[in-house]
Amino acid sequence: MADPTPVADAAASHGGGLPQFDLSQWPGQIVWLLMTFLFLYLMFSRVFVPNIGETISEREDRIAGDIAKARRLKDEAEAQAKAAAEEMHAARDRAQKLAADAKAEAKSNAAKQRAEEAGRLAKGFADAEARIAAARDSAMQHVHSIAVETAGAMISKLTGAPASAAEIDAALSRAAPAGQA
């Protein structure tokens, strides 16, 4: 075991206690404090702060560039959306115009077909009326001859003597209403 006296002698020679509080040690400590402060000041002012400043500047530039790019992309997107809306509006107008044209053409075709059908029906009615009138006229001519024959047969049956065609014609003319002879 070592003798504790040398340590005790050293402590006694220095006045005991902490060296920071020994006033004889202060000039050396102040020099080392100034050198350390100068070293740290130089390191911060020449190395650390400029590097941090560059990093902050680069980050600000990148953020500003990203914001500008985002604004540009937003403007482009808005322009494309506006163009798409205009194209959609134009397409809707074209579709409505095509629908209106198709509707008008369909109405026109239907009207034309109705007119053609009406013309065919009118012609058919006119032809039918002409045939009916011809049949009626033919029948009416036969009615007179049938009436003459029937009247002659009735007279001969009733009287027993035949009547002449001229007498029967005259009798039918008097018996028939005006304009029907």
Image (cartoon, helix red, strand yellow):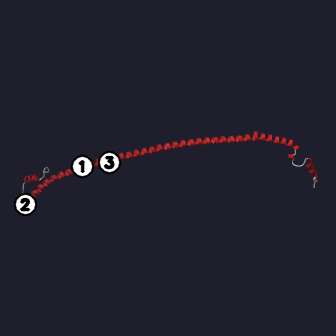
At x 56%, y 41%, the residue is 76
Q: Is mark 3 on a helix, strand or loop?
A: helix
Disc 3 from disc 2: Cα separation: 61 Å
Q: In the drawing, does residue 107 fall left or right of residue 18?
A: left
Q: Name the residue under label 2.
A: 158
Disc 3 from disc 1: Cα separation: 19 Å
Q: Earlier in the sequence, mark 1 or mark 2?
A: 1
Q: Is mark 1 on a helix, strand or loop?
A: helix
In the image, 70 versus 31, the foreground residue is 31
In the image, 162 versus 36, the foreground residue is 36
Q: What element carries label 2?
A: helix
Q: Which of marks 3 and 1 is nearer the N terminus?
A: 3
Q: Which of marks 3 and 2 is nearer the N terminus?
A: 3
Does residue 23 lie above or below 145 as drawn?
above
Q: Name the residue under label 1.
A: 127
Q: Which amino acid does label 2 sit on?
A: Leu
Mark 1 closeness class: few <14, some 14–19, many ≥20 residues within 10 Å: few
User: In the image, which disc is placed on residue 114?
Assistant: 3
At x 11%, y 56%, the residue is 149
Q: Which amino acid does label 1 sit on?
A: Asp
